[in-house]
Image (tube, grey):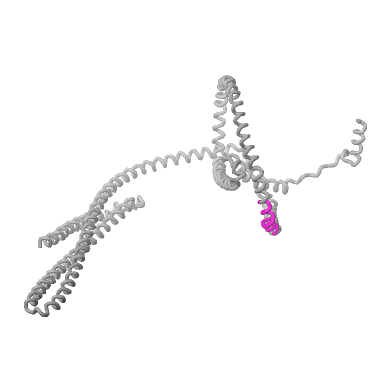
Amino acid sequence: MGIRKEKKTKPMSMSALLLLLSLLALSAASASASDEAPAPPHQEHEKKDVGVDPHSDLKLQLDHLRSKILFLESSIDDRTKELTFKDHAISNLEKTIQHKSQNIASLQHDIASLQKQLALDAADKAGQANAKTILLEQQIEALKKEIESQQKKRDALEAQSIVADNKVRELSAKLESLQKTSDEQKKRIQKTERALKAAEEELMRAQLEASAKQKQLHEVHGAWLPPWLAIKMTHYMEVMSAEWNEHGKPLMDSFIQMATEKSKQAQKWAEPHLEMAKTKWIPVVQEKWMVLKTNTEPYIQLASSKSVEWYETAKIITAPHITKFQEVSAPHIQNVKKISKPYIDRAAELSRPHVEKLTVLMQPYTKQAMATYTSFLKSATTYHRQAQANIGEYLNKHELTKQLVTKELVWFMASALLALPFFFLYRILSQLFCVKKPRKQTRSSHGNHGARRHKRRHADK
């Protein structure tokens, strides 16, 4: 009975704790509702002027945490209900155990009386009673096991409720920290608003100064080129664009069409040859390559080892001479630097104002040129790196070329591969547009010139 009383007091204490937690959650919800009261109209107007509310993320996090707290409270209530239900079930099971124990006692009493009264039927009735007792004992053991499992479940639920309480405490602490951070951010926003106002004023001043400088630059740029040269430049540009539209563009289109047709014809012509090469020539070449590789591998290894030895010996021989040359030439170089320094400084001082004027005049032209140059350089570097990676992979596949792979070789091959299309395009354009003039035949280019020269040689002999 003492055990039952202890079991009943535990859920009572848990329910009291849960009631306290629910009251705390309700107070926190009321406080948050009072914090989230509607702002006055002048504050809403200021928020609209500022733009997007920076506290929206914090409010969302607060709402999310509050919803988590409510969910945990509801789960705690459900678990307390489950615990009470299981307590009732345990009490019912205990009652059934008591009832069945009473039945066992009555049966044992009946068995004893029957043994005294009926000596003849004692064996049969004793066997029946024993069977019943065995069944009842089995039922009692099953009920005990069920009670133990229920107690284990109850302990697990109590542990879960403790974990939930800890989580609620952690979330409340997080809420407090978030509220503190929100207050700090409000203060920072006020400071940034003030700084923004000051920055806007400075920006207005800078814009006014920039507009004044731009006007001065326009005046300088207009004064740099004389009007007759500007008119001629525009005229030449118009003539060049008209010539390109009339002659250059159709020629380019026809050349592209011809190139596409020729490439298609070349592909059709090369298809059977490629198949022949794949079926017949490539296996033969591979066999020959393997034979050549096996034959030349020792020679290559010997040559590489010898070249390394020669390089090391040459380095050892030339190292003292190089150091001597550096020691001898160092004082002369320093004397040349000392002598030339005042002249260089003087030239820099004289050319500085002219260079500054030139930079001011060329600034509107150099910006666009620098932008195009940077974009071209970025694309060229990306293509060059891709080409380097592909060439390095291809060379590392074969054992013979693997030994010769270096960064410098890969870089040079990639740059040559990128320069080849430009070279071919230059050659094609030079063949199209640069028409060679026929040379005039001189008198010395007649047929009898060879005979005369032959005679002269014969005479010399």
**Left-right relation of 87 to 270:** left
Q: Within the image, what quadrant is residue 103 found in? A: bottom left
**Residue 351: x %, y % from top left:** 57, 28
**Left-right relation of 50 to 239:** left
Q: Within the image, what quadrant is residue 375 found in? A: top right
**Left-right relation of 197 to 242:** left
Can residue 224 be seen by looking at this rendering? Answer: yes
- Viewer-closest of 120 and 27: 120
Query: Does residue 270 lie above or below 213 as drawn?
Result: below
- Tell me which segment is drawn in magenta: 272-286
Query: Does residue 327 lie above or below 72 as drawn?
Result: above
**Residue 87: x %, y % from top left:** 17, 65
- Viewer-closest of 314 and 296: 296
Q: Within the image, what quadrant is residue 329 found in? A: top right
Which SS type dominates the magenta stretch? helix
**Residue 362: x %, y % from top left:** 56, 37
Say which residue appears at 42% left-offset and 40% top-offset.
Answer: 205
- Viewer-closest of 314 and 368: 314
- Is 285 part of what is drawn in magenta? yes
**Left-right relation of 97 to 339:** left
Query: Does residue 130 lie above or below 165 as drawn?
Result: below
**Residue 256: x %, y % from top left:** 67, 54
Can residue 257 be seen by looking at this rendering? Answer: no
Q: Which image quarter holds the C terminus? A: top right
Q: Which image quarter holds the N terminus? A: bottom left
* Numbered disc total: 0
Residue farthest to the front, as pictured? 120
- Is 429 part of what is drawn in magenta? no
